[in-house]
């Protein structure tokens, strides 16, 4: 973009080259679409109230809905940034992330996002992306269960494709060890501290038996009574039976998850790896006794993860229906 004569006249003291650099920088910022908490302040002023109301109803009906959306947000952002790609059904052009190994028969909450998106569309047609609806709904769900709040940056666009292969390769698994976990998060620009704080999301939610069967039947770094209780409903061969990730306060967002780890009652191998004689032991111990420190770090890490962007050149849109492109 070339500087106009009015621009030059307004700033006669600036060299022409500097003006060119300023204008190019401004154009680049605009093209990248930087996120802002006030992105919809004029185009959809009641957005937050609409999402909050819908989430309040959903959590009253089933507290697990908050955990469903928190997991969807994590799995969406970890694959090509926070772009709503996890919602897309398969097409001849791409395979849905819903059927990736970390999501298949376990990711939940798609219908809830569809319902919230429908309310938002009724209030502000073709304005708010599914990715932003998920970001807002996730924050509201955590808050409604007693967890921390944070400033939700907005202005994301929805992907026009899904990335099943990337979901298979990049999303952390329940069987990962600490080294693998740190590497997966570092690849996304998230630190080990971010990783340990974000893992506190497991203070709500449940896991299927096949993800923890080996741990409760074979692991040594596990409380014996805890393992015995879990084995009652989880055969060594695995099953779809569910157990809470935090058996102390499964429907409250607090720091009890870390107290469970210190007591060797982490349900998943990947969770207990955070407190198993490794680099994160001190941080887990601190979070287990300092709820405020956990809340601060979790909120900061959620903002950081929510800023993960799609690859440069990725086409985006505001989807009218979250499960298909326009």
Image: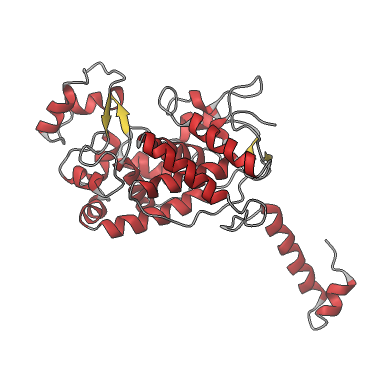
Residue 276 visible somewhere in the drawing: no
| Residue situated furthest left in the rendering | 225
* Nearest to the observer: residue 185 or residue 204: 204
| Residue situated furthest top in the rendering | 237
Direction from residue 313 to residue 64 in the image, left or right: left
Q: In the image, residue 61 lies at what x, y percent?
A: 38, 34
Q: Is residue 186 above or below residue 225?
A: below
Q: Is residue 216 above or below residue 298?
A: above
| Residue situated furthest bottom in the rendering | 13
Q: Is residue 156 above or below residue 20?
A: above
Q: In the image, residue 256 lies at what x, y percent?
A: 23, 46
The picture quadrant where one finds residue 177 is top left
* Nearest to the observer: residue 1 or residue 110: 110
Q: In the image, residue 204 lies at what x, y percent?
A: 31, 40
The picture quadrant where one finds residue 241 is top left
Q: In the image, residue 18 lies at what x, y percent?
A: 76, 73
The residue shown at (74%, 59%) is 27
Q: Is residue 291 above or below residue 195?
A: below
Q: Quadrant of the N terminus?
A: bottom right
Direction from residue 62 to residue 25 in the image, left or right: right
Q: Quadrant of the C terminus?
A: top right
Task: Tell me which colouring the rendered structure shows.
Answer: secondary structure
Residue 153 visible somewhere in the drawing: yes
Direction from residue 102 to residue 269 in the image, left or right: left
């Amino acid at each position: 973009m070339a500087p106009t004569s009015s621009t030059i006249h307004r700033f006669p003291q600036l060299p022409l080259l500097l003006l060119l650099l300023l204008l190019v920088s401004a154009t680049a910022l605009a093209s990248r679409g930087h996120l802002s908490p006030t992105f919809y302040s004029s185009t959809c002023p009641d957005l937050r109230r609409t999402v909050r109301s819908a989430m309040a109803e959903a959590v009253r009906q089933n507290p697990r809905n908050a955990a469903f959306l928190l997991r969807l947000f994590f799995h969406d952002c970890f694959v090509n940034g926070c772009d709503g790609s996890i919602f897309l059904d398969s097409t001849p052009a791409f395979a849905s992330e819903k059927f990736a190994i970390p999501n298949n028969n376990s990711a939940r909450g798609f219908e809830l996002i569809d319902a919230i998106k429908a309310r938002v569309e009724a209030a502000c047609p073709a304005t708010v992306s599914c990715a932003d609806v998920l970001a807002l709904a996730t924050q509201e769900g955590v808050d409604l269960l007693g967890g921390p709040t944070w400033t939700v940056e907005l202005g994301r666009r929805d992907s026009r494709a899904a990335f099943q292969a990337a979901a298979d390769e990049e999303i952390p698994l329940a069987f990962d060890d600490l080294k693998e976990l740190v590497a997966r998060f570092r690849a996304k620009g998230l630190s080990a501290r971010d990783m340990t704080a974000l893992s506190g999301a497991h203070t709500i939610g449940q896991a299927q038996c096949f993800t923890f069967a080996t741990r409760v039947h074979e692991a040594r770094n596990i409380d014996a009574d805890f393992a015995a209780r879990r084995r009652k409903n989880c055969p060594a061969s695995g099953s779809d039976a569910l157990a809470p990730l935090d058996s102390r306060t499964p429907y409250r967002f607090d720091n009890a998850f870390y107290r469970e780890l210190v007591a060797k009652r982490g349900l998943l191998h990947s969770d207990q790896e955070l407190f198993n004689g490794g680099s994160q032991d001190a941080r887990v111990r601190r979070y287990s006794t300092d709820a405020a420190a956990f809340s601060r770090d979790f909120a900061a890490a959620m903002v950081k993860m929510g800023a993960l962007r799609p690859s440069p050149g990725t086409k985006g849109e505001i989807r009218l229906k979250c499960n298909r492109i326009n």
